[in-house]
Image: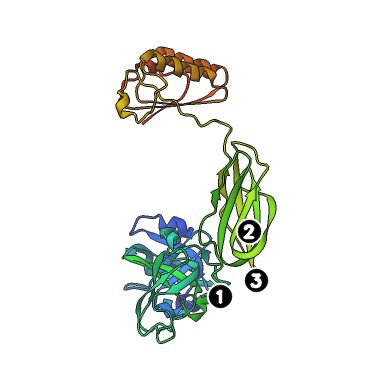
Amino acid sequence: MAAWAAAGLILSNLLPAQSIVDARAQPLGNTVTVRGIVTNGPELGKIRYLQDGTAGIAAFPGTGSVPGFDGVVFPGDSIEVTGTMVSYHGLLEITPIASFSIISTGNPLPAPKSISLAQISDNFQSQLVEFECITFGNAGGTFNNGGTFDITDSEGATAKIYLRNGHPLVGSSIPSEPVRLRSVLSTYDDFQLLPRTADDFVASTCFFFPQKLEQSDITTTSFQVTWKTSLPADCVLRIGTDPTPDIPLPVTGYTTDHGYLLTNLTPGTIYWVQIEAQHNGETIFSEATPFATRSLSSGQIKTYFNHGIDPAFANGFVADGETYEEVLNETIARIDAAQQTLDVAMYNNSRDVIVNAIKAAQARGVRVRYVAALDASNTALDPAPSFPVLYG
């Protein structure tokens, strides 16, 4: 019993353990019990961050806590903690700690979540995170004292790391080259990244795609795709008609500027394209991106007015019609000609003849999408027609 007491276990305070994500959802002031793997030690002070498979949480032995917590809890320990859920400058933490026990030691730490600086959010709070190609604002200098230090990633997003006074990195050199940064994501009014030791700075090749894939030279059966890599690379283009393209096409040239002309495609079709790039044994994948071939439609736009116009203001433009009858007849003709889909956007509609034509199109299998103005007069749409209408 003495060994358990030294670990901070108080039997009268035991509660069934819950997942950390469920504990984080509890109202502030509630007592929670969680289990997780500890991811830091005294380099971050008395606080300990722990994770299970669902989320992360901080545990701080503040006033009223059982003694001994920060002296016996280390990275890789699997622990159970009971205490009060509070928010300290935006950081959800358990304090005071009513009880704790060490279940096992020497466990592997959770794998860091690989995200970009722009993706930092409360969803990753108190968890280990990892960022590629991080540069420091004062690269090559020295972590002279505790405080915040600016960092930037390859996308231009920025954030800050924080070192407390007495942190083991204080007095060491700030990385002069880009690194892969591992840290605990914490909060003190704003997000802070907390590296633990120099091992959290890993040399990075900074191999990435500087920009999204671009499409050009679009025809009915072909288009050009271009992209860049930050370092020279061999590439394979994958193409398909769904978001997981699986047809590989090798791309010639070991370079940073790449391009591929896709041919023998189908008109008016969406194709998904993804790039696989390799540099010195490292492989990266671009986001799968949808592109489309040009359709066989003429692209012609007809313009009708329900009254005459002054040609002096038309810059030579000649309308296709200038009477109400011409507008109505052309609208009905277009609806009657629809074979597969019909998209209608009408501010207001009081013409039953138009609605009846749309109903007839739907009855012969045409898919109808109709958009109408919420505050306009649409008496022809009352009662509600058989086709769907979106009001906005």
Compared to 204, does 52 lie above or below? above
Compared to 217, does 14 lie above or below? below
Separation of marks 3 and 1 at Cα, in angstroms: 38 Å
The residue shown at (35%, 81%) is 146
Separation of marks 3 and 2 at Cα, in angstroms: 13 Å
The secondary element bearing badge 1 is classed as loop
Which of the two labelled residues, at mark 3 and mark 1, occupies the earlier sequence position?
A: 1
Residue 143 occupies quadrant: bottom left
Residue 324 in the image, given as x and y percentages of width and height: 36, 15
> Which mark is in front, 3 or 1?
3
Categorize mark 2 by other alpha carbons within 10 Å: few (<14), some (14-19), many (20+).
some
Left or right: where does residue 85 sit relative to residue 228?
left
Is residue 285 visible from the viewing direction of this image?
yes
104 and 270: which is toward the camera: 270
Q: Amino acid at mark 2?
A: Glu
The residue shown at (50%, 58%) is 211
> Which mark is in front, 1 or 2?
2
| Label 2 sits on residue | 276
366 and 22: which is toward the camera: 366
| Label 3 sits on residue | 280
The residue shown at (55%, 48%) is 216
Which of the two labelled residues, at mark 1 and mark 2, occupies the earlier sequence position?
A: 1
The colouring scheme, among rainbow, by chain, secondary structure or one colour, is rainbow
Left or right: where does residue 41 sit relative to residue 378?
right
Q: Amino acid at mark 1?
A: Thr
Residue 269 in the image, given as x and y percentages of width and height: 60, 38
Is residue 101 visible from the viewing direction of this image?
no
